[in-house]
Image: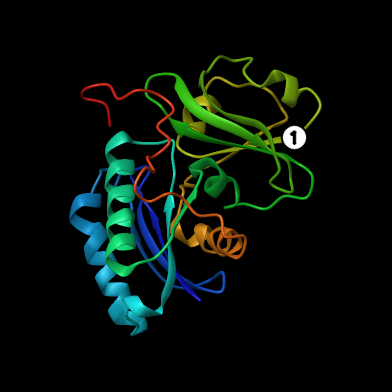
Amino acid sequence: MYILCIETSGTNCSVAISYEGKCIASKEINTGNFSHAEKLHVFIQSLLEEVAISSNNFKAIAVSAGPGSYTGLRIGVSSAKGLCYAWNLPLIAIPTLEILAHSIQTDNKLIIPMLDARRMEVYASIFDAKYNEISPVKAQILEPNSFIEYLSSNEVIFLGDGSDKFSKICPHPNAIFIKDKFPSAITMCNLAWMRYQNQSFEDIAYYEPFYLKNFVANSK
């Protein structure tokens, strides 16, 4: 029950191999630049050799669905689809902000993962402590009073590269900021396993990443 997980939605180039939902091997690099084209397939091949398994051992390929970097998502999804065709495997797509939310645990706080969307805009969604999505992903311009309806009655954890710029303008005492959290293939392992058990697969021929916004020239 091996699943190959691929996460390339941002600057973190991340690959993991899971067995029944548990990560058994991973490789990732985040230099702040986009190195997916150079590193992704090298990482995949290295992990196959490290774990000493072949393509025949895999049950599915999982990929981060977006939103995120247009180029990063294209590389990740194209690679995942190519492997699905070559290895005759189903494709699993996991929303990027869901992956990011699951990178932390909390007893009763809200979780707002944020991805940088340039300038003062972020991609954000809102989850409760059990990772139920209570507000779907959207692009939002950050202001000092952003998310005030949640902050007024709850402690809220903000994480992801988009939260860094919000921390500079948000004065609310209920806001908790966690630095250096990025979507990772390691976090995808259990999420992919649950989707595999539910047979939650994508149509490989027609699947496209969830960009949320149209591509703009010279954007990351």
x then y, percent, for residue 215: 30, 25
For this orientation, the residue located farthest to the bottom is: 52
x then y, percent, for residue 159: 55, 39
Q: Residue at x 40, y 26 (%)?
A: 117
Image quarter hosting the C terminus:
top left
Q: Is residue 142 above or below residue 109?
A: above
x then y, percent, for residue 148: 70, 19
Q: Residue at x 25, y 71 (%)?
A: 45
Q: How is the image coloured?
A: rainbow
Is 169 in front, or is 78? 78
Q: Is residue 17 above or below residue 109?
A: below
Is 82 in front, or is 18? 82
Marker count (numbered): 1
Is 75 in front, or is 115? 75
Q: Residue at x 45, y 21 (%)?
A: 121
Mark 1 surroundings: few (<14), some (14-19) or many (≥20) residues within 10 A = some
Answer left or right for 194 relative to 23: right
Q: Quadrant of residue 172?
A: top right
Q: Secondary structure at mark 1?
A: loop
Q: Is residue 131 above or below residue 84?
A: above
Answer left or right for 152 relative to 63: right
Q: Is residue 219 above or below residue 76?
A: above
Q: Residue at x 40, y 24 (%)?
A: 213
Q: Which residue is mark 1?
A: 155
Q: Amino acid at mark 1?
A: Glu
x then y, percent, for residue 109: 75, 41
